[in-house]
Amino acid sequence: MAIEELVDTLLYEGYALYPYTPGATKNATPTPFGIVYPPAYAAGCDAAHDHARLECVVQGGSALEATIRWITAPGDEHRLRLGPIAVGERVTVERPGARFTLRADRGDGVVRCCVHNTAEVAAGLERGDALRHSLISVHIVLQVRDGRFVSPLQSGRESVNTWPVLASDSDDTILGAAIVLPDHPQVAPRSHGNLFDNTEIEEALVLHVHSLTDAEREAITDPKVSAMLERTLSLGPQDIIGLHGGLEEVSSAPEIAGCASGSGVGDAENNPGEDSVTVDGVTFVKGSRLLLTPGTDRSVHDRMLNGRRATLERIYIDYDERVHLAVTVDDDPGQQLMRETGRYLFFFAHEVQPL
């Protein structure tokens, strides 16, 4: 299931960070999010919580259930299922050091799922010691039968120590994530697997992994990290190129005087921009050659391109009706690669001359 794949990925966010060696300063203690600390530690730290509470609103529904997933400091995974319960019911499960509750109010449709750390520890613990008694990377998945959830981003309900979002096409699933996400998040289809830092650029991390020394690789003993290294090191050049960012096409754009008729603006799912556009009496046609003449207000890199010839690859118009010309440089040996991966340089009309 897509939600399982997503939670599998999020569960280990921050579990280990580059260079992944246990001796690295940033890996001295785990740095994941969504931590539910022991009450004694949380009481002495304003940034720590001894519970996580997800609140949302459901419309309709014959039954609700929750799946709570977390890891502990050694990296052991845990999973607990609550329910199913009917609207108006409540269920609580006690485990050593933790309490889990799911309730659904009949009147206003408010659903609450709570995770409390009940571990008794001495006051004054250091963070590393507190983590050994914590629920780490807590993720809550709520599902409703025969109903739908209102987007938590719009419902006005307040959650604590979790970020709930819609997580299914039919809006019958809520994910309480440990990091900020939009509604309907998904793992990028081009991703080759979890790198424990999913807020980073995967291409950069893959290249970093390939640059690890033999000594650094030998120092890594965690089996989860070792499996990630083995998978990542097996990626070839084409796999890495596939991760290279490109320009995401849009399905619509505002109309503007001077645009070529029949350009397909707004009537195609994958809009390649305009075929041509006229700006201040000068017409620019996609595929034509340009002379780059950036002004002195541009960056040093842009000014270095002054006098170079380029090909006009795309023409885009933003919501302020400004025209952006996307080009590749003709004598750049990587021009074809830039074209294939959608990596363009952008100029305004007054910064180029048609040839």
Image (tube, rainbow, N blue to C red):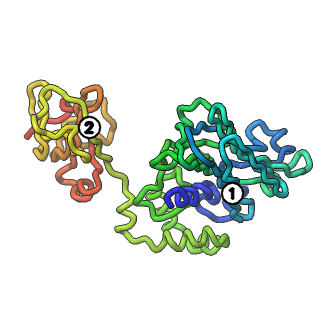
Along the line of sight, the residue nearer the viewer: 337 or 6 = 6
Along the line of sight, the residue nearer the viewer: 39 or 293 = 39
Dot 2 or dot 1, earlier in sequence:
1
Residue 175: image x %, image y %? 58, 48
For disc 2, the marked residue is: 252
Image-quadrant location for residue 17: bottom right
On the rendered structure, is 35 left or right of 166? right
On the rendered structure, is 7 left or right of 29? left
The residue under the point 29% across, 42% down is: 250
Report whether residue 148 is seen: yes
CA gap between label 2 and label 1 equals 43 Å
What secondary structure is marked by label 1? Answer: strand
Name the amino acid type tagged 1.
Arg
For disc 1, the marked residue is: 81
The residue under the point 20% across, 43% down is: 314
Report whether residue 306 is seen: no
Name the amino acid type tagged 2.
Ser
What secondary structure is marked by label 2? Answer: loop
Residue 224: image x %, image y %? 62, 69
Along the line of sight, the residue nearer the viewer: 17 or 353 = 17
On the rendered structure, is 37 left or right of 182? right
Label 1: how many Cα within 10 Å (few below 14, some 14–19, many 20+) = some
Along the line of sight, the residue nearer the viewer: 68 or 146 = 146
Vertical placement of 279 versus 66: above or below? above
Residue 119: image x %, image y %? 86, 52
As drawn, the label of residue 73 is none
